Amino acid sequence: MYVYHNVVDARGDSASTESETFAAVEDAIEELDQLTRKVLMHLNTSTVLVTADHGFLFQRSALDATDKTVLGDKPITAFKTKKRSVASG
């Protein structure tokens, strides 16, 4: 069984809801805990693995100017550019 759970991403990836990231993590942990208990009780299994596709860096307070860096020009090989990342190949 594969379950995709996107509560944290759904709230944390939007500027209008990114302040809810920590609450989203708490909600996700609770929901996944409940789900794993149901799987263990009702699906005749003894093992459940929970993994994550990535982590995140987030803080509630604003960054100082010295904490930020500026990307002058995006690399010519960049194929995806977002607020916090550049994917380049």
Image (tube, rainbow, N blue to C red):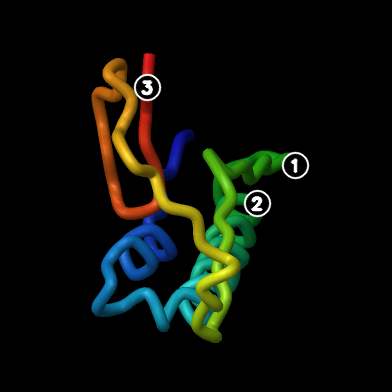
In three-dimensional space, the C-alpha distance between marks 3 and 1, rounded to whole angstroms, equals 42 Å
Amino acid type for the residue under numbered disc 1: Ser
Q: Upstream in the sequence, badge 3 or badge 1?
A: 1
Where is 68 relative to 42, above or below? below
Identify which residue, 63 or 48, lies in the foreground: 63
Disc 3 designates what residue?
88
Residue 11, disc: none
Task: Please give the name of the residue rendered at 56% of the width and 55% of the height, measured from the top-left corner.
Answer: 56
Q: Picture coordinates of residue 68 (x, y %)?
A: 51, 62
Q: Are marks 1 and 2 in contact (CB under 8 Å)?
A: yes
Residue 46, disc: 1
Q: Picture coordinates of residue 32 (x, y %)?
A: 55, 61
Q: Residues within 10 Å of mark 3 (few under 14, many from 20)?
A: few
Where is 88 relative to 89, above or below? below
Count of labels shown? 3
Disc 2 designates what residue?
40
Amino acid type for the residue under numbered disc 2: Leu
